Image: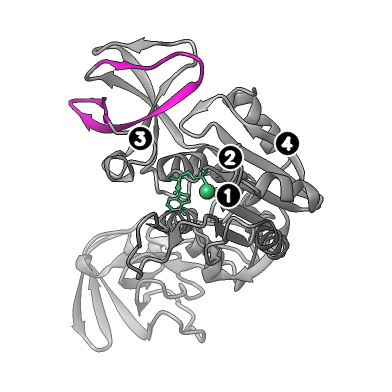
Amino acid sequence: MLSYEEALAELLANVPKPRPQGVPLREALGRVLAAPIEADLDLPPFRKSFVDGFAVRSQDLGQTPAKLKVIGVIAAGDSSLPTIEGGQAAQIMTGAAVPPGADAVQMVEKTRRENEFEVEVLEPVGLGENVATQGSNVQLGETVLTEGRVVGPAEAGVLATFGRAEVEIYAAPRIAVIPTGDELVEVEQEPKFGQIRNSNAYALWAQCRRLGLDATVFSPVPDEPDQVRRSIREALGYDLAIFTGGVSMGEYDYVPRVLAEEGVTIFFHKAAIKPGKPILVGRKDDHMIFGLPGNPVSAFVTFELFVRPAVRRWMGFKRHSLHKVSGELIVDATQKPGRKFFKQAMTVWAEGRFRVRPIETQGSADLVAFSAANSLLILEPEVARLEAGQQVEVLLLDDTNPYYA
Ligand code: AMP
Ligand code: MG
């Protein structure tokens, strides 16, 4: 059986290469740039005033206070500018173009307005003071964002600055979530004896949303080969399909067999992890197929351990796995050695360090207990016990910031 690391490596090696796609600027938020962004203009694009004040010739202020003749008012956005000559000034607003002849701006606080035609400048200004020269931030043609950058709010502003109404990002997979099982009823239904509500579809859909993607959720598929086959054919219309349930070794677990019959190459069907030993990953052409266990906690955890890295790799993120931190274990954690155990835990930052408290549960059906966890404590396969006070590693589930690369 493959270790988690081997299984993940196998999976990542089989994720289709990220494909560029043009989208409107607003849809680029949280996504990865597929091409560098070059400045389409100088920034600032013209000589510009940093302050509200008076555009002057600095040599006129050798002795202050000095009276200057006000020959006009320049607002931000004005394009016809007066030329400033000796003894003259123009009133100017923040962001307005500095007029020819002027070489500095004195801020309004250091002036006294005599009347409409005259200003008294109280202090001298240095050459170029309060003036941003053209191209002093960025020059035309310069690379302002590199390929691989994640578009966050500041990047959205940068893209807008340089006129990118449409942005080349890496495309996201179109995802289908397919619950399987005769026992499943929908959330609004009252389960009869032997039935349970289809909770996995909602959790998995929400996990996709946390990655910034809206998955299509199929109605539960009965444990019947033809129905499973039909759902697989429909699922292959998506880039990435996530089956849940019906992937183990039970008599009615048809998903693996029918996938193989439909031409899906299965890379692995098991990994040495807990929860979630039956975990299937396959591919047909550029379609990736995941078969997650039916148990709600196992489905949740295997999504985070396998589907998430694949989706993020697909979308061009360099960092694909959950954020790992180390912290101090608060109470002992044990396991029967053999598989890598991702044990649900609550991790909080307190007094300068992470403190990790494992959460005891009734097993991998116990989603209620799991819902109180925000992290997964890692017990390596050979480790039977971690003791309170020890430094341990945890994966943060709540690291919802989709913007980091
Ligand atoms: P399976 O992997 O199909 O053997 O299912 C394992 C367990 O998970 C069974 O107790 C199922 O009833 C349960 N289960 C399967 N699918 C779902 C689902 N969509 N929502 C909640 N529980 C499920
Ligand atoms: Mg089942």
Residue 94's mark? Answer: none
Identify residue for label 3.
Answer: 375
Q: Nearer the viewer, residue 243 or 47?
A: 243
Upstream in the sequence, badge 1 or badge 4? 1
Relative side of 173 to 298, left or right: right
From the image, tell me which residue sits under label 4. Answer: 267
Instruction: Kindly report the distance in space between the C-alpha atoms of the residues bearing marks 3 and 4.
Output: 28 Å
Provide the residue designation for mark 1: 149
Please tell me which residue lies in front, 123 or 304.
Answer: 304
Question: From the Cβ of disc 2, is ligand 1 less than 8 Å away?
Answer: yes
Task: Give the residue at mark 2.
Answer: 250
Viewer-nearest of discs 2 and 3: 2
What are the residue bounds of the magenta stretch?
332-360
The verdict on residue 334 being magenta is yes
Q: Earlier in the sequence, mark 3 or mark 4?
A: 4
Q: Nearer the viewer, residue 213 or 141?
A: 213
Mark sitting earlier along the chain (4/2): 2
Predominant SS along the magenta part: strand
State which mark lies toward you, 4 or 2. 2
- Give the SS element for disc 4: strand
Please name the amino acid that badge 4 sits on. Answer: Phe
